[in-house]
């Protein structure tokens, strides 16, 4: 019995407080970065860029402190894989941002292995998970936990919106063209995996992409706050249809 309790407590402490498992620690601004490999200075620019994205979010807290756990090839990854199965390249737990895959901060890359190998933008990956930390920080664990949380398009769409906003604006991005691209991809998809917005060969569950577009529509076009979106009871389908009608009306006006 005692052995069992000890084993359970050990696993719980590894999952909730994994920081002590790492050989190296590096403090920078609001971040403490943990890793088994030596942490070079290249990570600073990535952290600054991720912070610049997150800063623009209405749910940002400038005093919030993040732990960034670089877990590639770590004991923590092994435990996490055993408990939760192999899955997403990154996740968040309390104020921990957990990056499970190999990264190359110098080139701003994260090497995704699940469900398809691809190279992702490391800054976006960090900003997405940092936004999840802030959701929990602002709205509390009763509203944001693995068992009870807002609908997936609201849960994942907002971190995607925060993480990708600047990147997409910089490229002469158009929401109407992006909606067309999504509709087209979704009509051809055979399962719920779909090409990511930036089309770097990465695929995401379709509610990441759909959620991003819907959140972008509600915030940028309808000028709703995330607070308001969370409180709103209008169904996903109604918002989606409304967005399609808006997109068609914009295109008609252009023709
Ligand atoms: Zn997410």
Image: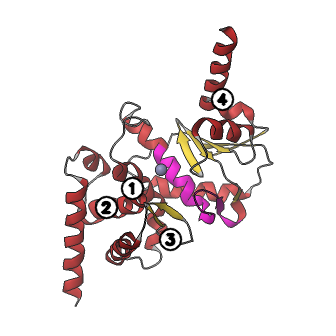
**Residue ID for mark 4:** 14
- Label at residue 157: 1
Q: Earlier in the sequence, mark 2 or mark 4?
A: 4
x and y percentages locating residue 81 in the rendered image: 64, 41
The N terminus lies in which quarter of the figure?
Answer: top right
- Residue 200 location, x and y as percent? 56, 71
Q: Which mark is residue 198?
A: 3
Note whether 13 is above or below 50 in the view shown: above
Specify the segment rendered in magenta.
107-132
Tag 3 secondary structure: loop
Q: CA distance from mark 4 to mark 3?
A: 35 Å
**Residue 31, visible in the rendered structure:** yes
Which one is earlier in the sequence, the residue at label 4 or at label 3? Answer: 4
Decide: marks 1, 2 in contact (CB < 8 A)? yes
Q: Earlier in the sequence, mark 3 or mark 2?
A: 3
- Per the image, is 111 magenta? yes
Q: Nearer the viewer, residue 110 or 167?
A: 110
Residue at mark 1 to residue at mark 3: CA–CA distance: 15 Å
Q: Residue at x 19, y 58 (%)?
A: 238
**Mark 1 residue element:** helix
């Amino acid at each position: 019995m005692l052995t069992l309790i000890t084993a359970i407590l050990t696993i719980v402490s590894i999952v909730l407080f994994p920081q002590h498992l790492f050989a190296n620690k590096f403090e920078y601004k609001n971040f403490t970065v943990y890793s088994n490999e030596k942490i070079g200075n290249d990570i600073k620019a990535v952290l600054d860029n991720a912070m610049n994205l997150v800063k623009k979010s209405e749910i940002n807290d400038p005093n919030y402190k993040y732990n960034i756990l670089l877990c590639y090839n770590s004991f923590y990854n092994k435990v996490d894989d055993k408990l939760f199965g192999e899955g997403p390249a990154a996740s968040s737990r309390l104020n921990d941002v957990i990056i499970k895959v190999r990264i190359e901060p110098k080139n701003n890359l994260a090497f995704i292995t699940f469900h398809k190998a691809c190279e992702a933008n490391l800054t976006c990956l960090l900003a997405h998970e940092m936004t999840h930390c802030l959701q929990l920080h602002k709205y509390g664990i009763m509203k944001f936990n693995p068992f009870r949380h807002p609908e997936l398009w609201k849960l994942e769409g907002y971190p995607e919106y925060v993480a990708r906003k600047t990147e997409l604006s910089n490229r002469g991005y158009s929401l109407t063209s992006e909606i067309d691209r999504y509709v087209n991809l979704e009509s051809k998809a055979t399962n719920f995996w779909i090409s990511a917005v930036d089309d770097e060969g990465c695929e995401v569950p379709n509610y990441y992409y759909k959620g991003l577009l819907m959140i972008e529509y509600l915030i940028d076009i309808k000028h709703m706050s995330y607070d308001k979106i969370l409180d709103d009871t209008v169904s996903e389908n109604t918002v989606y249809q409304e967005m399609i009608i808006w997109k068609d009306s914009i295109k008609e006006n252009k023709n």
